[in-house]
């Protein structure tokens, strides 16, 4: 996941904030138009947009930023299809970066995804090399 630098937007002028507050009053149905096409937002996106618009309607300045998803070692191992112990060994050897939150290890989703991609690439390269060896003429 690529993080984008936070974006800070000043609060709306009082008149615009009042109009937005009125429009939001009692409604959480947010419809978005992108290039003339209507898109209904899923609940999580809708909630985030309603919160953002609510803050603007109160005249607040708003900062929007990304948050990297951090996984527990159990979740990361499950995602990778490996044992929890094997994953801990990989982090101990530095093959998968880990961050500590107190005594608990956390692994970025992007790091586990990158490790899986490397494993697939290595397995594909290993399979190709094995096939070349099978095709090579043996001793006569």
Image (cartoon, rainbow, N blue to C red):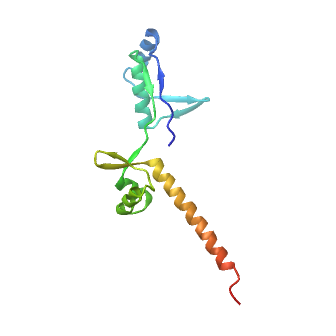
Q: Quadrant of residue 27?
A: top left
Please tell me which residue is depicted at 39% across the width and 27% down the height of the picture: 51
**In x, y percent, where is residue 9?**
48, 20
Classify residue 4 as left or right of residue 104. right
Please tell me which residue is depicted at 56% across the width and 29% down the height of the picture: 33
The residue lying toward the viewer, choosing from 1 and 122, is 122
On screen, residue 60 above or below 132: above
Classify residue 131 as left or right of residue 68. right
Please tell me which residue is depicted at 45% across the width and 9% down the height of the picture: 15
Classify residue 18 as left or right of residue 101. right
Q: How many badges with numbers are in the image?
A: 0
Quadrant placement of the C terminus: bottom right
**In x, y percent, where is residue 129?**
63, 71
**In x, y percent, where is residue 32?**
52, 29
On screen, residue 112 above or below 130: above
On screen, residue 111 above or below 21: below
Residue that protrudes farthest toward the bottom in the picture: 140
The residue lying toward the viewer, choosing from 4 and 43, is 4
Q: Quadrant of residue 91?
A: bottom left
């Amino acid at each position: 996941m690529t993080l984008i630098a936070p974006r800070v937007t000043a609060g709306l002028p009082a008149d615009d904030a009042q109009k937005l507050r009125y429009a939001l009053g009692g409604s959480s149905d947010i419809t978005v138009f992108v290039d003339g096409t209507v898109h209904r937002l899923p609940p999580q996106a809708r909630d985030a947009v309603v919160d953002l618009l609510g803050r603007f309607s109160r005249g607040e300045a708003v900062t929007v930023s990304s948050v990297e998803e951090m996984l527990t070692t159990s979740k990361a191992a499950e995602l990778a299809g490996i044992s929890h112990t094997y994953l801990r060994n990989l982090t101990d050897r530095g093959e998968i970066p880990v961050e500590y939150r107190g005594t608990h290890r956390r692994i970025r989703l992007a790091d586990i995804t990158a490790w899986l991609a490397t494993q697939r690439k290595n397995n594909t390269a290993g399979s190709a090399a094995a096939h070349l060896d099978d095709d090579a003429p043996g001793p006569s």
